[in-house]
Amino acid sequence: MLRLDAVSHRYPGSDVDALEELSLQVPGGTAMGLFAPSGSGKTTLMRIASLSLRPTGGAVTVAGHPVSGVRYAVPRSIRRTMGTVGQSPRAATSPRLSLRRIIAEPLSFADGRRTPHASAYTERIAELADLVQLSPDLLDRLPHQVSDGQLQRACLARALALDPKVLLCDEPTAMLDASTTAVIMRVIAGRAERGAAVLVASHDHAVLGASCHVLRPLGGTE
Ligand code: ADP
Ligand code: MG
């Protein structure tokens, strides 16, 4: 379960809040869509929820544990239960790692390896690639050799690798065509059927409506 209580954020140097006292709860087994126009604070909220940005106000609770730090200050036991797909797949991947190794990152780190080690996880990587509809021949390519949409699907496969209890996806289908979007949204919402708390941010109501319970806490309009 994921809970945000009155989280706010003001970026340094700004004189307005990018996000103002937002509260929401995503119980396990639920997929929620966060729908609001561009610039309304969705990415800020998703970065706070994924424990990569410290809010300037409010509190984040994951599976009943209040979390105060961000990134590596968050206990590994909590980090491991969370899967995150950021809005920009290029910013979220190392340009020197093949897609296979990108997907292997959480598997490797959970096993105490310091670098992503694909050969130990061949079957799991194949299974994850199939789930997000990445063809096997793409797995040995580097990020600059694939499209944004393909790289974003590798990021989703990576986020799913450890069967997260909390799955956070920021505009996960913005770079995909309509048929791939439908498949990917089913994969994401399907995690809720397996018990995860799922939160998906999008500026596109149609994308969310099909698979998620839609929230409009940021004042979005259609
Ligand atoms: P959304 O994802 O809904 O498009 P964002 O969370 O990216 O919205 O942005 C919310 C607001 O915060 C916008 O006004 C944006 O310009 C501002 N903002 C986002 N990131 C930064 C940053 N790193 N520094 C300063 N302002 C930012
Ligand atoms: Mg955004």
Image (spheres, helix red, strand yellow):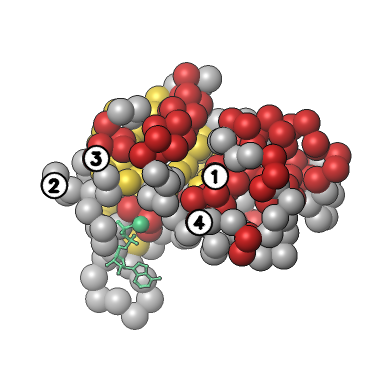
Say which of marks 2 and 3 sits in front. 3
Residue at x-position 60% and y-position 46%: 154
> Which residue is at the front of the view, 92 or 43?
92
Q: Is residue 108 visible?
A: yes
Question: What amino acid is labelled 3 in the image?
Answer: His
Say which of marks 3 and 1 sits in front. 1
Q: Residues within 10 Å of mark 1 (few under 14, many from 20)?
A: many
As drawn, 208 above or below 192: below
Q: CA distance from mark 3 to mark 1?
A: 20 Å
> Which residue is at the front of the view, 67 or 52?
52
| Residue 115, horizontal then vertical, whole percent | 81, 55
Q: Are marks 2 and 3 in contact (CB under 8 Å)?
A: no
Q: Residues within 10 Å of mark 2 (few under 14, many from 20)?
A: few
Q: CA distance from mark 1 to mark 4?
A: 9 Å
- Cβ of disc 1 within 8 Å of ligand 2? no
| Residue 33, horizontal then vertical, whole percent | 32, 37
Residue at x-position 31% and y-position 38%: 207
Q: CA distance from mark 3 to mark 4?
A: 21 Å
Question: What amino acid is labelled 4 in the image?
Answer: Asp
As drawn, 28 above or below 146: above
| Residue 220, horizontal then vertical, whole percent | 18, 48
Q: Earlier in the sequence, mark 2 or mark 3?
A: 3
Question: What amino acid is labelled 1 in the image?
Answer: Arg
- Assign a secondary structure to mark 3: helix
- Residue 148 is marked as 4
- Assign a secondary structure to mark 1: helix
Task: Kindly identify which residue carries mark 1.
Answer: 153
- Residue 221 is marked as 2
Task: Kindly identify which residue carries mark 3.
Answer: 205
Q: CA distance from mark 2 to mark 3?
A: 9 Å
Horizontal placement of 206 versus 67: left or right? left
